[in-house]
Amino acid sequence: MGLRLATVHRQIISCERCPRLREYCEHIGREKRRAFRDDTYWARPVPGFGDPRARLLILGLAPAAHGANRTGRVFTGDGAGGSGDFLMASLHRAGFANIPTSRHPDDGLALRDAFIAAAVRCAPPGNKPTPLEIANCLPHLDAELSALGRVQVIVALGKIGFDAYVRLLGRRGVVVRPRPHFAHASTDALPNGQTLIGCYHPSRQNTNTGKLNARMMDDVFRKARRALDRPTSSD
């Protein structure tokens, strides 16, 4: 990991901007789930994970209470068939991940040309962060994005992540007209040269009901791959 990205991640881990979220994460870490009663929970803000030279940024909602809030790695540890495995299986098929599962931080998972982050870095009660909590976390995403430096394509998993990225563009002075609207497999060419792609979040609720299936997610990452392979004006 680059020195600059490591510095950003230390700042994320030490963040105390949202008292409600910090209290909730620490409470979950003490109470635990029975299946994980012998685990030591991370219970801190969760930084992004992946290739420091990534051109693809995958932006989720927030850590799961007994997933990333337990393991300390985004989309990791929510069990077989959980959102982490569903996402990683698709990334593996698309050539962005070396293995198709995401179970624990020492599982050997490595991402290629991809980096995963979250709009909110602490697990929120009911998976529902407040608008202020989302706004409080935007500087972390901004700093991470600056440290990555090569991002060309953003796949936003769910409307909250999608809207957070559009809000970040405004913070950076990038005005997008008309304003992008979230939809599965939506594609928006941004004025800064990036491409923003929408994707339903791979939550169990979405995958168990069939709102999102493997083919639909694979379609999104094929779009992302095509956008990355497209020649740019500097090529």
Image (cartoon, grey):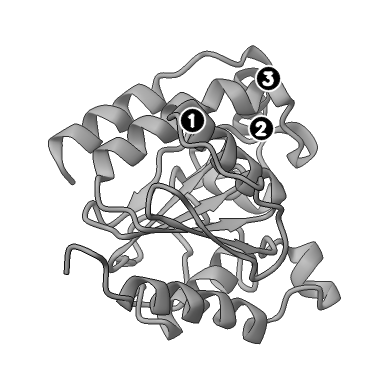
Q: Which mark is residue 132?
A: 3
- Evaluate if marks 1 and 2 touch, with contact meaning CB atoms under 8 Å apart: no
Please name the amino acid that badge 1 sits on.
Answer: Pro
Please state the horizontal and vertical placement of residue 79, each as a whole percent of the image: 61, 64
Residue annotated with mark 1? 45
- Residue situated in front as seen by the camera: 185 or 160: 185
Residue type highlighted by circle 2: Ile
Residue 122 pos. (x, y %): 57, 32
Q: Secondary structure at mark 2?
A: helix
Q: Residue at image x 76%, y 33%?
A: 125
Helix, strand or loop for disc 1: loop
- Closer to the eye: label 1 or 2: 1
**Numbered label attached to residue 103:** none
Question: Which of the two discs, 1 and 3, labels the residue nearer the N terminus?
Answer: 1
Q: Label 1 to label 3, Cα distance in Å?
A: 16 Å
Among the two numbered marks 3 and 2 on one chain, the one whose residue lies closer to the N terminus: 2
